[in-house]
Image (cartoon, rainbow, N blue to C red):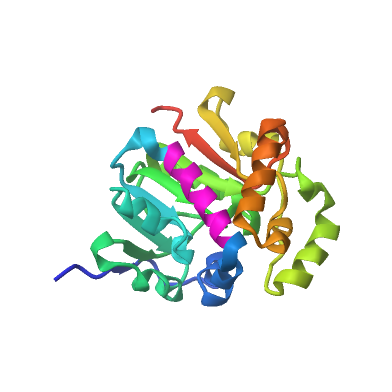
């Protein structure tokens, strides 16, 4: 028989713990990524992530806040032993539906102050987390502390259509219904929070056009076409968002 995902509880739950992953681990949240546009978004996210982690083949991964099951099964399916850290036991619901053969391990604990010793995992990932945390800088520093090789995470960049955040959020809310507010950042803010040199950080913008545009198009070929055009013109590289970041541990 294949092993079930392992659930390990850490310290008792604290009322002041940040828990944005409780919302992103629900089926309601997952419904935002249904349909043609959602599949396109997840495919691009998976390709970028696998490309960034390729040099660390077979490395152990801690996926912080990964109860949404967008990244953990992809990494586990590509030969990485994966542990998911969730802020609450409810965050394992979607992971429990994954193929048990993937061997995804679940740990309950603080997603900001990570409950692991220094350099416990080769790589630490975090998706859908940074823009929803008050202590996002500490979150990134803790990821660097716990990794041996590097970290991979995503964030919405202000140098994009997000400059029109207030207008676009109202539009997103109208079409997506269950979207949630988020913070945007500059590349300088991210690098300063990481406290590393330029050469240690890689930025991979995923899209030039906001996802609400792709949801309205409802066509994979059209979405791929306009994103390819924006990429060819250099627009995605300069003004794309969200951005997936790879940061090598300074000592690695």
Residue at 36 percent across and 73 percent down: it is 97
Q: Which residues are magenta?
A: 38-52
Q: Please determine whether, in this image, residue 193 is positioned above or below residue 98.
A: above
Residue 233 located within the stretch drawn in magenta: no
**Residue 8, percent from left and from top:** 31, 67
**Residue 222, percent from left and from top:** 66, 52
Q: Nearer the viewer, residue 194 or 81?
A: 81
Q: Quadrant of residue 35?
A: bottom right
Residue at 73 percent across and 63 percent down: it is 216
Q: Nearer the viewer, residue 123 or 213?
A: 213
Q: Nearer the viewer, residue 222 or 183?
A: 222
**Residue 36, percent from left and from top:** 59, 63
Quadrant position of the N terminus in the picture: bottom left
Q: Please determine whether, in this image, residue 23 is positioned above or below residue 102.
A: below
Residue 42 located within the stretch drawn in magenta: yes
Residue at 60 percent across and 55 percent down: it is 220
Q: Quadrant of residue 183?
A: bottom right
Side of 142 where 119 appears, left or right? left
């Amino acid at each position: 028989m294949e092993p079930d995902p392992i659930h390990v509880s850490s310290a008792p739950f604290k009322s002041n713990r940040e828990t944005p992953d409780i919302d992103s681990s629900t089926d309601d949240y997952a419904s935002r990524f249904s349909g043609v546009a959602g599949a396109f978004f997840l495919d691009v996210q998976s390709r970028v992530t696998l490309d960034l982690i390729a040099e660390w083949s077979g490395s152990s991964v801690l996926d912080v806040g990964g109860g949404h099951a967008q990244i953990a099964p992809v990494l586990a399916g590509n030969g990485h032993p994966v542990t998911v850290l969730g802020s609450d036991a409810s965050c394992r619901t979607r992971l429990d539906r994954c193929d048990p053969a993937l061997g995804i391990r679940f740990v309950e604990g603080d997603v900001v102050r990570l409950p692991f010793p220094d350099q416990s995992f080769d790589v630490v990932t975090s998706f859908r987390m940074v823009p929803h945390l008050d202590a996002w800088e500490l979150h990134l520093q803790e990821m660097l502390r716990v990794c041996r090789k590097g970290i991979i995470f995503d964030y919405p960049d202000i140098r994009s259509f997000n400059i029109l955040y207030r207008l676009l959020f109202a539009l997103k809310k109208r079409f997506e219904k269950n979207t949630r507010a988020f913070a945007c950042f500059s590349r300088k803010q991210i690098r300063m929070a990481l406290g590393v040199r330029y050469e240690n950080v890689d930025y991979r913008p995923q899209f030039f056009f906001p996802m609400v545009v792709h949801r309205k198009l409802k066509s994979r070929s059209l979405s791929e076409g306009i994103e390819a055009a924006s990429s060819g013109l250099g627009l995605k590289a300069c003004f794309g968002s969200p951005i997936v970041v790879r940061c090598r541990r300074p000592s690695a």
